[in-house]
């Protein structure tokens, strides 16, 4: 190994000193996640060579078609967390209910892991970056079997969060609430090596990422913000550039490095938004805040949301602080904050005498 290269393992052990009472459980948990990430990376990389692309013919709890790689990644992370013995519950996007890790070692384990094993999985068939997103909490209960109550905690309670991006190179980016660090997998030695120390997000960026195909279904505040992004203004370097991969990990990773905003708002068809609070929004929000950015629902801080259910969805505006604040301003002015679902487009059109919607 080249002298001076710091591996993820070395870094984690060094950082344990930031937590004087730490016994090494969190460090081992992060190591377990990194091991599963390498296994998933190997499979993602040879996806075209083996029979692992495409749909598996089943759907997950959210009614989404599962890809073979979704199922594979889910199994690998659960297996690594089970054999590591440092967490008592895994909550995954791919399973209906929480999974109790039943092993003599893990019964007293104090950590909970929430995971999106493969994010952006619709991109696997077309060789576009996908990812894994994870979030770690300390269980609240002090004795007995941990329960769903231990999982449903605010994002502010996260002990650590991170993502792996399987892109043109594979990176693991994580935070334990003391800044954000990124590690690139060196395939020749099979190690994640520190490549992006103390990552900081530009306060203002020039990229906006949103699925504009849903435009007609967006709240008025989002439409007005998009107009703002597209108007010419030399002083603020507008119009901004539009970039959308369709993998939350890929889109946010790019914006973290270059500066930008990622929005997945409510729509008249998905009144709660699409992305999941526990597996996608909370971990990404912690990372982005730790890098100096901001994450909100358009009105409120993501990390302050009290979760009520495992697979809860929320709208998200996340990225460079000044951009998120501008989008929030548009939301405040043009969209009424409401807990009630917005009127569906079909209902509005029916009210105008147009039956069958625009599809
Ligand atoms: O295709 P859409 O509606 O733009 O949605 C894209 C979003 O959905 C997701 O793919 C959902 O993630 P999963 O693949 O884990 O279900 C995000 O990664 C992405 O940002
Ligand atoms: Mg996802
Ligand atoms: Mg997923």
Image (cartoon, rainbow, N blue to C red):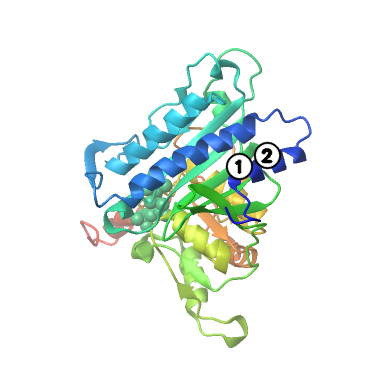
State whether residue 87 is above or below residue 51. above
Q: Are dots 2 and 1 in contact, CB under 8 Å?
A: yes
Tag 2 residue: 13
State whether residue 170 is above or below residue 82. below
Q: Secondary structure at mark 2?
A: helix
Q: Secondary structure at mark 1?
A: helix
Q: Is mark 2 within 8 Å of ligand 3?
A: no
Using the numbered discs, state the Cα–Cα distance from disc 2 to disc 1 in whole angstroms: 6 Å
User: Does residue 64 appear in this view?
Assistant: no
Q: Is mark 1 within 8 Å of ligand 3?
A: no
Question: Residue visible at 71% across and 42% down?
Answer: 14
| Residue 201, horizontal then vertical, whole percent | 63, 63
Tag 1 residue: 9
| Residue 40, horizontal then vertical, whole percent | 39, 43
Dot 2 alpha-carbon crowd within 10 angstroms: few under 14, some 14 to 19, many 20 or more: few
Tell me, for residue 89, which label it has, or none. Answer: none
| Residue 358, horizontal then vertical, whole percent | 24, 62
């Amino acid at each position: 190994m080249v002298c001076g290269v710091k591996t993820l393992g070395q870094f984690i052990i060094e950082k344990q000193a930031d937590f004087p009472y730490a016994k090494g459980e969190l460090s081992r948990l992060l190591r377990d996640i990194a091991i599963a990430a390498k296994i998933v990376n190997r499979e993602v990389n040879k996806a075209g060579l083996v029979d692992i692309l495409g749909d598996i013919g089943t759907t997950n709890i959210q009614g989404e078609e599962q890809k073979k790689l979704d199922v594979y990644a889910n199994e690998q992370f659960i297996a690594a967390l089970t054999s590591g013995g440092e967490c008592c519950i895994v909550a995954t996007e791919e399973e209906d209910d929480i999974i109790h890790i039943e092993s003599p070692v893990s019964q007293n384990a104090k950590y909970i892991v929430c995971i999106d094993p493969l994010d952006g999985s619709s991109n696997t068939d077309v060789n576009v970056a996908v990812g894994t997103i994870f979030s770690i909490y300390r269980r609240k209960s002090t004795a007995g079997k941990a329960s769903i109550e231990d999982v449903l905690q605010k994002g502010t309670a996260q002990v650590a969060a991170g993502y792996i991006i399987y892109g043109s190179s594979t990176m693991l980016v994580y935070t334990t609430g003391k800044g954000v660090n990124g590690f690139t997998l060196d395939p020749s030695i099979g190690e994640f090596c520190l490549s992006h120390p103390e990552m900081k997000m530009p306060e203002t960026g020039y990229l906006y990422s949103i699925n504009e195909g849903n435009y007609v279904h967006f709240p008025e505040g989002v439409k007005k913000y998009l107009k703002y992004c597209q108007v010419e203004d030399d002083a603020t370097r507008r119009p901004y550039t539009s970039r959308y991969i369709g993998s939350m990990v890929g889109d946010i990773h790019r914006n973290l490095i270059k500066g930008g905003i990622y929005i997945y708002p409510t729509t008249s068809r998905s009144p709660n938004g699409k992305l999941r609070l526990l597996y996608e929004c909370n971990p990404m929000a912690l990372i982005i805040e730790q890098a100096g950015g901001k994450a909100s629902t358009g009105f409120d801080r993501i990390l302050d949301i009290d979760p009520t259910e495992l697979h809860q969805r929320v709208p998200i505006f996340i990225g460079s602080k000044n951009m998120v604040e501008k989008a929030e301003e548009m939301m405040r002015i043009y969209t009424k904050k409401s807990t009630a679902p917005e009127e569906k487009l079909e209902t509005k059109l029916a009210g105008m005498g147009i039956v069958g919607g625009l599809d």
